[in-house]
Amino acid sequence: MLFKTKADFKEVFEMYYIPLCNFANNVIYNETYAEDVVQDVFIKLWSKNDSLVINEGIKSYLFKMTKNKALEFLRTQKSRSQLHKNVNIDVVQSTDHDELSKVYMRMEQLNNSLRHLPPKCREVFALHKFNGLSYKEIADSMGISIKTVENHMLKAMKILRSILVKKKHLSTK
Amino acid sequence: MNINKLILKSLNKTTSLEEFNALEAWKNESNENLEFLKAMQEEHNSVNYKDFNKEQAWNNINSHLNQPIKKIAWAKWGIAAAILLLLSAGSYFYASNENIPSLFKTQNTIQNYALVDNSEIWLNTNSEVQYLSDFKTERKVSLSGEAFFDVKANKDNPFIIELNSSDFIKVVGTSFNVVNRDDEFDLTVYSGKVEFHALKRVINLTKGDRIVKVNGSFTKIRNTDKNVSSWKNKELIFDNILLNKALTQIGKHYSVKIKLDKSIDISKCYLRSKYTQESITDVMLELSKFFVMEYKQSESTILISKLKCN
């Protein structure tokens, strides 16, 4: 038995649903179908709860299943239309599901922290850190002063740091 | 070609096969190249990292967890499944097992459920079916919205669908489609016998009969519309029917508004075709080949500016 209670199952769902959806979305490029695929994986998982034995760890297993389901989806879609010419071949070829899952879990962790930021603050932070815009460019594109951009950045750092500290505190307990 | 440009193209999935092969070759040249490409990909993905609605997803998954859906599964498991079914049916009300839902509800999706008596229901979008009894002495549910019922035969235990406080549908074993909303009622029988109890009268229906509500009163007609349960079968059939009617049904099926320019007269146009799981884009494309047609398609509306039938 993989999960003793439904609560255990839900816990795993909570942890992996969003990263798995992002992973599936990067394979099939459709958010709705990506969600369908991942929900299907979880329903299957629960239905096999009694009999399933997983050797590789639940994380790798979920990513492997999601990849297989997403590819299966593409195959059935392809016969109908030629919309999906550009399959993400790197994902398809990658067989190291442990590595793959780590990448997505890292993104999830970062994003999870960003969710705690106020919307404007988050936008500024993302534009600077991910899109590599300078403070001046951000100020111009958002129609705010450089000083305000700086304040948003400082606030973002402060919040993120406090979250990190809290997490460390929890994990050492 | 500039390698950076190539990488950018690959991240946006716009490489041609040659470009893809060129990038593959470059990637395999050195470990450094490989690492760089991986880093770029990760960077790209994290910028595009999206939030998905966990709560809605959980509700959706949860509604699937405890109900056997596919009949095939039952056939395969045979007796074991029968015993399991008895156990789950028995424990449902008596142990008040909270894992088995007593309410089936859909929002944006069409769902298929099996009830404890092994009857099946398909729920159209924004619809709801609720258990009103324990299914042992009596089989009783309520419905709001649209559903297709395939009821397992049991002469001693009729299946009742409550429509409101006084009206209901009573069957022994049959299949039928029901729409029960504030402003709309439609009952179409596909097999077996159905008793329709409304306004303290009983109307007996058999295969091919249909009840519709017109100006507040119920009328019994023969059903000639092949698309009543197209939402469930995912199949639209047009057997030489008026194009006007066909367009209405296509619009309803795909939840789009199809508008015709006032200058167009299609009163003498007929359509004979069949669509199985095609997208609305494909359907419109085919129609534009049948008829001399010009149209504009946006997400929720289709505007036909020109149309001539042959």
Image: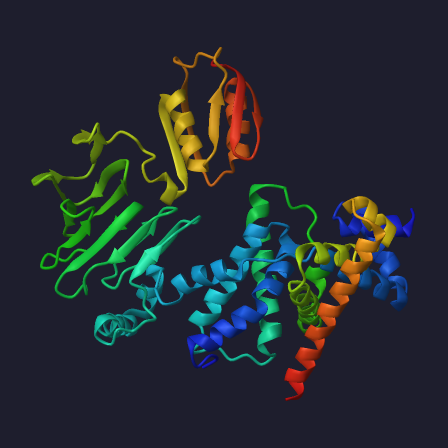
User: Outermost residue, bottom direction?
Assistant: A173
Instruction: Indicate the quadrant where residue B243 lies.
Output: top left
Mark yes or no: residue A131 visible. no
The correct choice, above or below, for B198 with respect to B98 in the image is above
Q: Position of residue B220 (x, y in %)?
A: 16, 31
In the rendered image, is residue B300 in sight?
Answer: yes
Residue in front for this viewpoint, B63 or A168: A168
Residue at left offset 54%, top offset 61%: A38
Q: Is residue B36 left or right of residue B137?
A: right
Q: Is residue B261 above or below residue B167?
A: above
Relative depth, front residue between B194 and A160 = A160
Q: Residue at x 12, y 59 (%)?
A: B157
Where, by quadrant of the figure, is residue B37 drawn? bottom right
Q: Position of residue B30 (x, y in %)?
A: 90, 66
Q: From the viewer's perspective, is residue B164 above or below residue A129?
A: above
Q: What's the image's color scheme?
A: rainbow
On the image, the x and y values in percent for residue B161 come to: 19, 50
In the rendered structure, the answer to whether residue B180 lies left or right of residue A163 reads left
Q: Residue furthest right?
A: B2
Asked whether A132 or B283 is in front, the reply is A132
- Where is residue B296 shown, x and y percent of the image? 58, 25
Q: Does A135 sit above or below residue A115? A: above
